[in-house]
Image (spheres, helix red, strand yellow):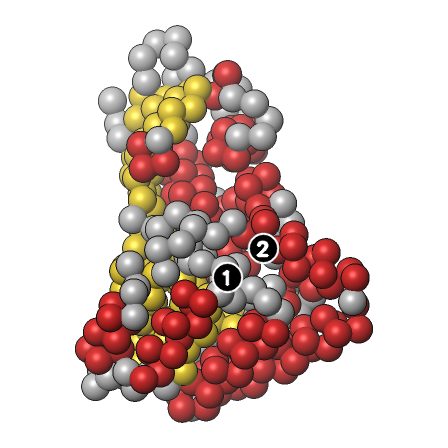
Amino acid sequence: MSVTIAQAPGKVILFGEHAVVYGRPAIAVPVTEVKAEAQVEPGERGQGTVIVASDMGQRIVLREAGDGEALAHLVRLVLKRLRAGRDPDLTITVTSTVPIARGMGSGAAVATAIARALIKHLGHWAASRTISDLVYQSEVLYHGTPSGIDNTVVAFEKPIYFVKDEGWEVFWLAKPLLLAIGDTGIESSTREVVGDLRQRAAADPGRYEALFDQVADVTRAARTALELGQQEATGRLMDENHALLQELDVSCPALDQLVIAAREGGALGAKLSGAGRGGNMVALVTQETRGAVDMMLRLAGAANVTVTEVR
């Protein structure tokens, strides 16, 4: 009666969100302070595979789930890849501290944890690239046109420089980053925000392509700054990226308020992270300013603040 447990972290996008959907680079990093955990154990005889995700209020019976159910789709993909049968008697229990619909990769974290635990439980091993590819296929159902950056950074748990349809690289930070992540408390649908921006970009391609190019320039400069340990320059580039995201009309008053509060608290830079119009923002802080930034974010209305170190 073995039980197999696996985990996966959350993530934040440091640079390049939205532009990454249009072939420009983006940088994302894991957030290990929040995690999804999946536990796989034998189920009762004849029950088939059952996914219990109490945090999301879901109990999914695999044999009854439709094609549009992302977690069921993921489990079917894994079982097919392992040639493990269509519906073994298993119970998969999922818990997560990754905030849902906040731009921290909750869906990718849950899917990654499930894939890892299920593959291990069935006596197999899979590389991080394989896990990432499986999770991406489930993300398509959830987000519509995901860039692929969430599943990549969550599966590899390293800073990632990512270009859609061209590839990605793990890269190394010259200095650890201390990030304060402020939650607006507002749920944000990646599918809806990305879809709305796609319509506006199609209606005025010249303007939006120029903005995407500017975001790309900032992202490339940020990678250089991160690799050289130039944290003040990194912070300034975060501010520039946020201004461009405002021009793309994916920010909102709650996010802008938290960004301003973080800067007033002494952050080196701050910006929204993820889809925008709610969700989270991220600020680059130091050991000396982390307390003041945390306080300012909470005073400005942050529902929660998470401080994480990225190496």
Question: Which residue position is annotated with label 2?
Answer: 193
Q: Quadrant of residue 202?
A: bottom right
**Residue at mark 1 to residue at mark 2: CA–CA distance:** 7 Å
Residue in the picture at 39% in, 47% down: 100
* Residue 12 drawn above or below residue 141: below
Q: Residue 276 carries which label?
A: 1
Q: Are marks 1 and 2 in contact (CB under 8 Å)?
A: yes
Label 1 environment density (alpha carbons within 10 Å; few <14, some 14–19, many ≥20): many
Position of residue 199 in the picture relative to residue 10 (left or right): right
Q: Residue at x 30, y 64 (%)?
A: 302
Mark number, residue 146: none
Q: Which of marks 1 and 2 is nearer the N terminus?
A: 2
Q: Is residue 170 visible?
A: no
Above or below, 251 relative to 43: below
Q: In which quarter of the image is residue 247?
A: bottom right
Element at label 1: loop
Between 162 and 238, the one nearer to me in the picture = 238
Residue 234 located left or right of residue 198? left
Residue 153 on image: x %, y %: 47, 60
Q: What residue type is labelled 1?
A: Gly
* Residue 256 appearing in the image: yes
